[in-house]
Image (tube, helix red, strand yellow):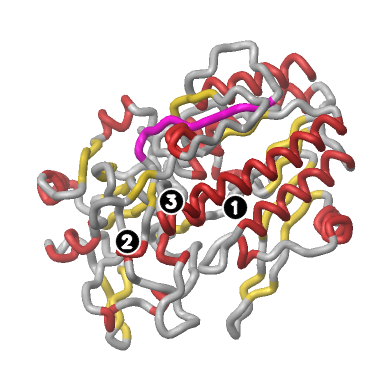
Amino acid sequence: MGSKLLARHGKTFTGHDVHSMASIFPAVTCPVQASMRTALPPAGHGMVANGGYFPQLKKVLFWEQAATLVSGERVWAPLRSAGGTAGMMFWQQSLVDDLDLVLSPRPIHKHEGGMIQDCYSMPGDLYGRLCKDIGRSFNLMHYWGPVTSRKSSEWIADATIAVMKDPAPDLLFSYIPHLDYDLQRKGPDHPRAAQALDVLETLTGKLDQACRESGYDWVMFGDYEINPVTQPPVFPNRILRDAGLFRTRMLKGMAYPDFFSGGTFAMVDHEVAHVYVGDPQDREQVRGLFANQQGIDRILDRQAQKELGLDHASSGDFVLVSSEGSWFAYPWWTERREAPDFATHVDIHNKPGFDPCELYFGWPPPGISMNVSKIGGTHGRSCNVAWFGTWNPERNISHQLDLAEAIRDWCGQHG
């Protein structure tokens, strides 16, 4: 829900003054949500991307859900220490935080393929009660993948309304995800982006009415701005592989990454990529490989990362920022026959980089597309996002950290 998106489509959300504020960098889901619950930049809470490189495991993992991945005191700590209650629904890294209520997707992947759809909830019977109250279970297929749709947001909105009635925490965080889908598929200028905003307006109206009936003030804010894709993506791991720095294992003709042998690789995440250099002596060579590469705007060393609040042990030796209109794709192969088997599947936890192509079917179905030219929108660069609601913070809000601090102030006053 970027400021330019609302202006582009003339969306004003009648009855609410829409404000603008600067985003966290990188402007992607996990860093922003971690900052909103700690009032810290990524350098403080440690979520530097939607994924992370875990050197003890020699593995890249995306979308891990453990709350222990986020460092720092929570903004709701003063509220709960004084006997108040707080809940979180469908936020990342919420299992299990210092909260009274939690709801998050948590399917079980079966050995023979497929999965058992489920949501983790605290209290344990919360998800079952919500399914009964709403009349349907949560369908993970509508939350991510090629059939994602407004239905994910509609279910979460209905569940949020139900929670406001029982058990009614004093502070409740929820997430409306559907703007992500068609804006990444088609871009923010496409008519389907306007349709997604219409859906958001309808859901906002429902939530507003329910909040008033339940005695809540509320604020809605955007995590980031999705920008139109106007240039081809950059493939940093192909560049590193061509230079002999990205290492692979060939299994049945497929090129799997070899992170155990100490090579160099890029963990890509939309418009941002963390580059981890295996041998310190290769750093200047790595910098040189990306220095004049079309589609790359900036190369952030540790000092530059510090200036942006991103200097954390989990960050890459270098952080690449794409040029406006471009983005980073994770593949290291050029021949389709070398693609690992996970390339044509929705595999958000194990791919060593975010893959927006999972929003499209490949051919023949049921595979996932590897056609990067289909992607219409991307994000991660610094941006301005919109916020509005019935709650009026007592401090000036010009940045997402300001809003997080205002929530912490509220928790201190209402504890």
What kind of secondary structure does the magenta stretch mostly adopt?
Answer: strand
The percent position of residue 299, horizontal first and vertical second, equals 21, 39
Q: Give whichever of discs 3 and 1 has the lower sequence position.
A: 3
Between 226 and 335, the residue placed more toward the observer is: 226
Q: Quadrant of the C terminus?
A: top right
**Mark 1, residues whose alpha carbon is within 10 Å: few (<14), some, or many (≥20)?**
some
**Mark 2, residues whose alpha carbon is within 10 Å: few (<14), some, or many (≥20)?**
many
Magenta residues span 381-389
Residue 393 figure quarter: top right
Q: Amino acid at mark 2?
A: Tyr
The residue pinned by badge 3 equals: 52
The residue pinned by badge 1 equals: 65
Residue positioned 12% across, 62% down in the render = 243
Instruction: Between label 2 and label 1, give the one nearer the viewer.
Output: 2
Whether residue 46 is visible to the viewer of this picture, yes or no, is no
Residue 382 located within the stretch drawn in magenta: yes
Is the C-beta separation of discs 2 and 1 under 8 Å? no
Q: Amino acid at mark 3?
A: Gly
Q: Give whichever of discs 3 and 2 has the lower sequence position.
A: 3
Q: Is residue 25 above or below residue 187?
A: above
Cα distance between the residues tagged 3 and 1: 12 Å
Residue positioned 13% across, 49% down in the render = 293
Would residue 62 appear left or right of 221 to someone viewing this image? left
The percent position of residue 187, horizontal first and vertical second, equals 40, 51
Instruction: Between label 3 and label 2, give the one nearer the viewer.
Output: 2
Residue 4 figure quarter: top left
Q: Secondary structure at mark 2?
A: loop
